[in-house]
Amino acid sequence: MARRTMSLLPHWSSRVFSVELNGTPFYFSTQEKHRGEEVPRVFRGNDGRCYSLLVCSSDTIRRAKFYAELKDKLLTNLPPECHLSPMCSFLPNIKDSLLKGYFLKDTSESSSPTERLLRDLTQRDPVLVCSYLRGETGGVWTQHLWSDGDNHTMQMPKDYYVVTAEAPEHHPSTLNIINSDVFYSFEEAYQVLEKCGDIIPEARAVLELLPSREEARRKPDFPVIVIEGLDATGKTTLTESLSDALGASLLRSPPHCLSPMRARFDREPPLIRRAFYALGNYITAEQIGQEGMKTPVIVDRFWHSTAAYAIATAVSGPVCNLPAEGSEVYCWPSDLLQPSLVVCLTLDPEERRRRLRDRGQGKTEEEQELDHNHLFRLKVEKAYQRISGPACVTLDASPPADQVLQQVLLLIRGKCHL
């Protein structure tokens, strides 16, 4: 832990810290001298003690697993007077510099229980802890870095002043998406599950199902049509009707062979869960290549879904926080088979919710989030629209199913000459 901390120190004064309060990020930074700057929003009117906990480890698997467990560990062991908020630290516009963690406000009478827990964390776990002290006048706050459970600063100025920082040009999470929340190559996703083999037995089973790189990219003789969209927009009905109308093979992503393992990986942190679903696309691509040598292929969801949900989840706040249109995060993986046409079904939110209620089926955590979080749904839809290579053709799915089918058949005949 000390070695990782030391590697951060040369750039520490360049780092920006973000704390989310009710979904809104507030930014602050540190500097060696105070020049009368205003107190950052997260410290105003605060009478308690403040701490930041940032998960930092060169082992990406360990870092992801520990961050996923940290909140439960804190909520279980901290005094009830403590309040946690999501936070992160990053170097502006520098990729892969993001450290995730929590900002802690402690209003309990004694700091002893909280600091005892934090000291234990720094001794055993990949977490960097800072405490924040208010000056006697109440207008100045200073940051102190803990070192391996020793409540002292480590090679930092005695007083590292905390000041308000401007919002960065890019939301900090957008610079950490590539091969962390969204995977853009077989090899990157493979390496994540390979490292998980000793701690997740199902990971080894997934690796045994994988095709070769060439099979996942092989272009079939017949057209490949992917139908995308949120749950309950009519994808299943449409894909089955298209299969019958065109005499096409029907495939679904994630592929059926991964169904027994989905519940296990849905409990894992995003890095591992996303790698699992990314590799599912390569298995589906192999199946497309095989079936597409004989007939056209209809696919119920593919890489667009994997990427859109991951991007919308990774980037907090409003839609404007998403990577801008044209960003590399929306580019199709170069080693994954590209479909001939992608149709994305859209539906009025109220109608979609009614259909979900009528279905009464179990939903994943992300599907539940779609059901009650209007903002999350908007971000997923916007991410769908921005993915390129190929882009989605958006189609209103509110008319009767037979009319939607005819509209899609017209698109297919125009694009794929079927």
Image (cartoon, rainbow, N blue to C red):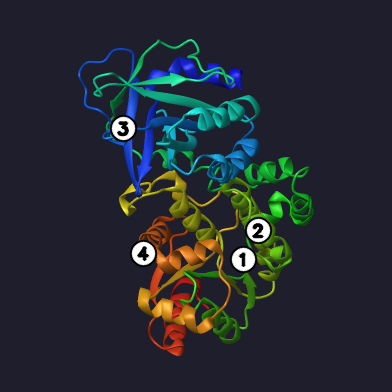
Q: Residue 230: image x %, image y %?
A: 47, 69
Where residue 241 sits, quadrant-wise, is bottom right
Question: Counting residues from the N terminus, which is met first, the one under dot 4 or under dot 2?
Answer: 2
Q: Residue at x 51, y 42 (%)?
A: 178
> Residue 253, labelled with which disc?
1
Horizontal side of 285 relative to 110 (left or right) equals right
**Mark 4 = which residue?**
374
**Mark 2 or mark 3: whose residue is earlier in sequence:** 3
From where the camera sits, is residue 55 visible?
A: no
Q: How far apart, in angstroms, are the residues tagged by discs 2 and 3? A: 45 Å
Give the mark nearest the N terminus, 3 or 4: 3
Kindly identify which numbered label has been placed on residue 43: 3
Sequence-first disc among 3 and 1: 3
Name the amino acid, label 3. Answer: Phe
How crowded is the residue under tag 3: few (<14 C-alpha within 10 Å), some, or many (20+)? many
- From the image, tell me which residue sits under label 2: 280
Secondary structure state at the residue bearing disc 4: helix
Check contact, mark 2 vs mark 1: CB within 8 A: yes
Q: Are marks 4 and 2 in contact (CB under 8 Å)?
A: no
